[in-house]
Image (cartoon, rainbow, N blue to C red):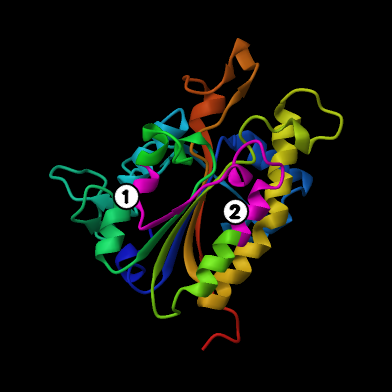
Amino acid sequence: MIDMNTVVGHRDIVLMTLDTLRYDAACEALARGATPNLAALLPDGRWEERHSPGSFTWASHWSFFAGFLPTPARPGRHPRLFAARFPGSETTAPGTCVLDAPDIVTGLAEKGYHTVCIGGVGFFNKQTPVGSTLPALFAESHWSPELGVTAPDSTERQLRLAARILAERPASERIFLFINVSALHQPNRFYLEGAEEDSLESHLAALAYVDGQLPLLVSALRRRGGAFCILCSDHGTAYGEDGFTGHRLAHPTVWTVPYAHLTLEPTEAHP
């Protein structure tokens, strides 16, 4: 396990949730060669199979922000990267960054991080009280319909916005950047030519689209000096398996998610 106490305060930190991405779909896309940018980033070129702590966006993200990222899909007590301090935690280890705050966003802010949220799905749209609660954790938050689920170019817009923010902040300042990628969430049929309804194939096509936009963010992070990045899904979704459709339900297509964390090194030109 990486010692997060050597990361916090020294590197920018990115948490990107690929909303609704299924583990089996993520692996299939790699096998097809449809996600070359992710393949180049992932440790050993593979996703790790994990279990989500929630079956839909709201539940999963509250867990993530409390330090409960997806759990490795194998027996054992698995140490966490972050923890909000509480007595009796059995997954807090010497390498865990323990924060004296109710959530890691607040805790990292107290460590000097500028916290940024770039929302995607409706729980980040700031148009209702429930859609405002998660973004309110951050010092800076962004959402517009162009970043949401109905915009076919949402990921490009999200990552261009992220790149601009990263470029504008002082290089000496540490940033915690959270991005909720909305493209994989329904509706995703417009990523598959001729599709009239969402399907596992349009889900895969949406992931290929997202992959094509990733260099925008990777280049911006490298120019700032690199970053520690967490890439994961918050939950999957069912497309008719065993009669189930959608999420917020207990089915392997929903609770089994892809996960990776990695360190991006700076460009050679960075001092």
158 and 2: which one is in front?
158
The residue labelled by disc 2 is: 158
Q: Residue at x 61, y 12 (%)?
A: 242
Residue underneath mark 1: 79
Crowding near pointer 2: few (<14 within 10 Å), some, many (20+)?
many
Residue 163 covered by magenta stretch:
no
Point out which mark residue 141 bears. none
Q: Give coordinates of residue 243: x percent, y percent.
A: 62, 10
Q: Residue furthest top?
A: 243
User: Around disc 1, counting alpha carbons within 10 Å, would you say few (fewer than 14), some (14 to 19), or many (20 or more)?
Assistant: some
Question: In the picture shown, does residue 261 fall above or below 181?
Answer: below
Task: Give percent across and percent down for residue 234.
Answer: 48, 38
Looking at the rendered structure, the kind of residue marked 1 is: Pro
- Name which residue lies at 80% across and 35% down: 192
* Residue farthest to the left, as pictured: 87
Q: Quadrant of residue 75?
A: top left
Q: Do we see residue 73 in this rendering?
A: no
Q: Is residue 109 above or below residue 193?
A: below
Residue range in magenta is 134-160
Which numbered disc flags the more N-terminal residue, 1 or 2?
1
Q: Residue visible at 18% across and 50% down?
A: 85
Q: Gap between marks 1 and 2, in whole Å?
A: 31 Å
User: What is the secondary structure assignment of the residue under circle 1?
Assistant: loop
